[in-house]
Image: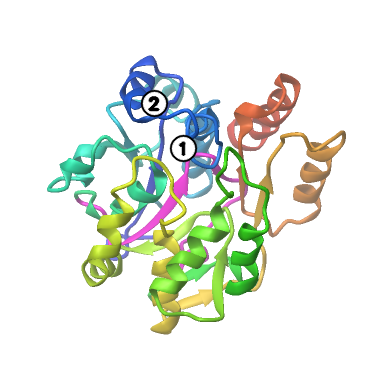
Amino acid sequence: MNNNFPIDIVIAWVDGNDPLHMQKMSPFLDTKSDKIDFIAGATRYRSAGEIYFCVASILKFAPFVRTIFIITDEQNPNLDDFLKEHFPNQNIDIKIIDHKVIFAGYEQYLPIFNSRAIESMLFRIPDLSENFVYFNDDVFLLRPVQAADWFVDNKIVTIGQWRNIFFDRLLRYIAIPKEGIRPFGFKFAQTNAAQIFWRKSHYFHMEHTPHARKKSVSAMLFEKYHEHFLKNISYKFRDAAQFNPQELFYLNMFAEGRAVKDTVDKTLYIKPVERGDGYIARKIGTFNKRPQIQSGCIGSLDLATEADQNILKNWLTKIILEK
């Protein structure tokens, strides 16, 4: 990677354990949303130290990256001591960007506690490179990557599958309601984006993986579908009416012939919650058997047992932090 084709990383992060954050969020909660994980349950915001592994994995396995931007709401992950201990010679800039910066001109929507809304505004980060990659803070690199794993011939590289819109929306409507609300999640927000883009039958189902993005295209979509984006950022918490901005971006790139579907599944998804004995061992075994896996996501680590959290953190430490 060189100055003619810089790549930045953007990470959305929140420390839900912070009393000030809880205090800021409290006036907007109601009894339903406070209890439901897919809206505003505590697990959406609690931090179990994932940000340290996320940043460390980029420094170790993607040293060509120019800048890591961490999006926060008046918070700081305080990485300095950690970086001095483990990466004293690293040369990647790490910048903390507040919500007020990316919502400049749209401050009426703040404070916001909704990743779909935040993801809608990532392209507004000052000095962001044209080519950037979006990480949730529970996504990690597990093996070395190259720029070509994300961008090829000025096209983005995607990981996922084309899926049936009708079938995946039907799954929501036959699901058992919780607190009177039918579940909506990762798939549903993607099908919403597909409908905005006038796709009738299939959408591109993304995996829990780093997402290659282009700033100029994201800005163009924000203007073209401005009313949809304004609605998307208007919800304090996740809502079934929202769409996934990454999906809208992907569909546009596929339509323009500027997206390449990776033929190899390079990601590992782990959700260590009520999975039974041997689940984590099987996942780690899958990683060991498949050298093509480059990234992983650990969902709801805070809900795992203390023993399972320790197993996973020790595993990540061995991969990412040990020399």
Residue extending farthest to the front is: 180
* Count of numbered circles in the view: 2
Secondary structure state at the residue bearing disc 1: helix
Secondary structure state at the residue bearing disc 2: loop
Q: Amino acid at mark 1?
A: Val
Looking at marks 1 and 2 on the same chain, the residue that comes earlier in the sequence is marked by: 1
Residue 38 lies, in percent from the top left, at 54, 42
Residue interval drawn in magenta? 127-151
Asked whether residue 323 is in view, the answer is no
Tell whether position 145 is magenta: yes
In the rendered structure, the answer to whether residue 126 lies left or right of residue 264 reads: left
Dot 2, how many residues are within 10 Å of its Cα: few (below 14), some (14-19), or many (20+)?
some
Tell whether position 216 is magenta: no
Residue drawn at (48%, 50%) of the image? 62
Q: Amino acid at mark 2?
A: Pro
Dot 1, how many residues are within 10 Å of its Cα: few (below 14), some (14-19), or many (20+)?
many
Residue extending farthest to the top is: 19
Closest to the camera, between mark 1 and mark 2, is 2
Q: Are marks 1 and 2 in contact (CB under 8 Å)?
A: yes
The Cα–Cα distance between marks 1 and 2, rounded to whole angstroms, is 11 Å
Residue 132 lies, in percent from the top left, at 36, 57
Asked whether residue 180 is in view, the answer is yes
Residue highlighted by disc 1: 55
Residue 181 lies, in percent from the top left, at 55, 45
Residue drawn at (64%, 73%) of the image? 263
Vertical relation: 119 (above or below) 163 = above
Residue highlighted by disc 2: 77
Q: Quadrant of the C terminus?
A: top right
Residue situated in front as seen by the camera: 220 or 2: 220
